[in-house]
């Protein structure tokens, strides 16, 4: 059971997990773990499933998925029947007014729809994955020189469920450097797997880039793939002027994660998010909503 905090209702809610029973068995049983290591974590497994989701035969999965997870299709600019395949539906765009962007330059916005855990004054060698498991930033991006610039900064972990809108966006105006690819496995990023696989984020396929934000300093964007994620697609233009809220890229099918690292004294995360993280709960957020502010001494 995954419980998260809903900021709007100020209540805790239970997440409906796609394939929850399967995930629990895979990541909690001896036989499941053997199958995970031999087959499921491998690139070929996710690639083949991704290829299937790109075919017209996968289209029949769209309507049941919408009904099972109560997805609001009024936010989408086209009818679900008009999608060519499941991946087209999964990586769908939204209507322009579906996610209002807070354009106040001092306000930090969420780059995605997802569940957020936030950490202040991070120890670069002990970044929290989940209670009991940590990893280092240099392991994650494989660049110790850049990592050192983020000592005592902030780390924001956004977990995207398969039911979420799966495009990720920029939090501010600025310019973004070209992205770096790191090959890896395809473990699930669900809390069930995070509790069982040490340094999971450092083991999975991922891409990272440095965003030179006008108002929040330099920010490391890390996009992490997961089981059945066919691809991480970057759609931004490197070194070009970027607007707050503009699209950076999207994931194909599967749950995924976006992690942002901020330098010391650049942002202040909203108190309710920090309090819920300390209690062990993620906070549900939507693209464009306020999650913090520019740091003020």
Image (tube, grey):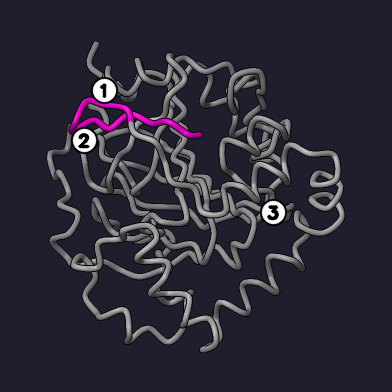
Q: Residues within 10 Å of mark 1 (few under 14, many from 20)?
A: some
Element at label 3: loop
Asked which quadrant contains residue 225, the reply is bottom right
Q: Are marks 1 and 2 in contact (CB under 8 Å)?
A: yes
Residue 238: give x, y in percent of width and height: 44, 61
In the image, 122 versus 9, the foreground residue is 9
Quadrant (top left/top right/bottom left/bottom right) for the C terminus = top left
Element at label 2: strand
Q: Is residue 169 above or below residue 148?
A: below
Q: Are marks 1 and 3 in contact (CB under 8 Å)?
A: no
Residue 85: give x, y in percent of width and height: 47, 82
- Which residue is label 3 attached to? 186
In the image, 12 versus 297, the foreground residue is 12
Q: Which residues are magenta?
A: 1-12
Q: Going 64% across and 47% down the picture, which residue do you hit?
A: 23
291 relative position to 258: left or right: left
287 relative position to 278: left or right: left
- Which residue is label 1 attached to? 270
Q: Going 46% across and 14% down the picture, which residue do you hit?
A: 121
The answer to which of marks 3 and 2 sits earlier in the sequence is 3
- Which residue is label 2 attached to? 290
The answer to which of marks 1 and 2 sits earlier in the sequence is 1
Q: Residues within 10 Å of mark 2 (few under 14, many from 20)?
A: some
How far apart marks 1 and 3 lie (CA) works out to 32 Å
């Amino acid at each position: 059971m995954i419980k998260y905090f809903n900021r709007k209702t100020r209540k805790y809610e239970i997440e409906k997990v796609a394939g929850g029973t399967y995930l629990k068995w895979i990541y909690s049983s001896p036989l499941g773990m053997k199958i995970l290591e031999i087959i499921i974590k491998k690139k070929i497994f996710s690639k083949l499933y991704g290829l299937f989701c790109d075919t017209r035969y996968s289209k029949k999965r769209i309507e049941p998925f919408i009904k099972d997870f109560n997805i609001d299709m009024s936010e989408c600019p086209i009818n679900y029947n008009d999608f060519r395949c499941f991946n087209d539906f999964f990586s769908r765009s939204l209507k322009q007014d579906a996610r209002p962007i807070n354009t106040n330059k001092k306000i930090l916005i969420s780059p995605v729809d997802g569940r957020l855990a936030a950490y202040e004054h991070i120890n670069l060698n002990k970044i929290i994955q989940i209670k009991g498991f940590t990893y280092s930033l240099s392991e994650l991006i494989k660049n110790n020189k850049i990592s050192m610039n983020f000592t005592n900064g902030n780390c924001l972990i956004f977990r995207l469920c398969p039911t979420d809108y799966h495009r990720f966006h920029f939090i501010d105006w600025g310019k973004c450097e070209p992205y770096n690819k790191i090959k890896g496995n395809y473990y699930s990023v669900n809390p069930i797997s995070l509790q069982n696989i040490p340094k999971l984020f450092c083991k999975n396929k991922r891409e990272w880039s440095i965003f030179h934000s006008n108002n929040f300093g330099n920010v490391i964007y890390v996009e992490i793939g997961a089981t059945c994620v066919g691809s991480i697609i970057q759609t931004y233009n490197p070194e070009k002027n970027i607007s707050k809220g503009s699209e950076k890229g999207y994931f194909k099918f599967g749950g995924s994660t976006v992690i942002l690292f901020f330098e010391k004294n650049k942002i202040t995360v909203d108190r309710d998010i920090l309090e819920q993280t300390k209690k062990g709960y993620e906070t549900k957020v939507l693209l464009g909503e306020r999650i913090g502010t520019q740091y003020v001494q």
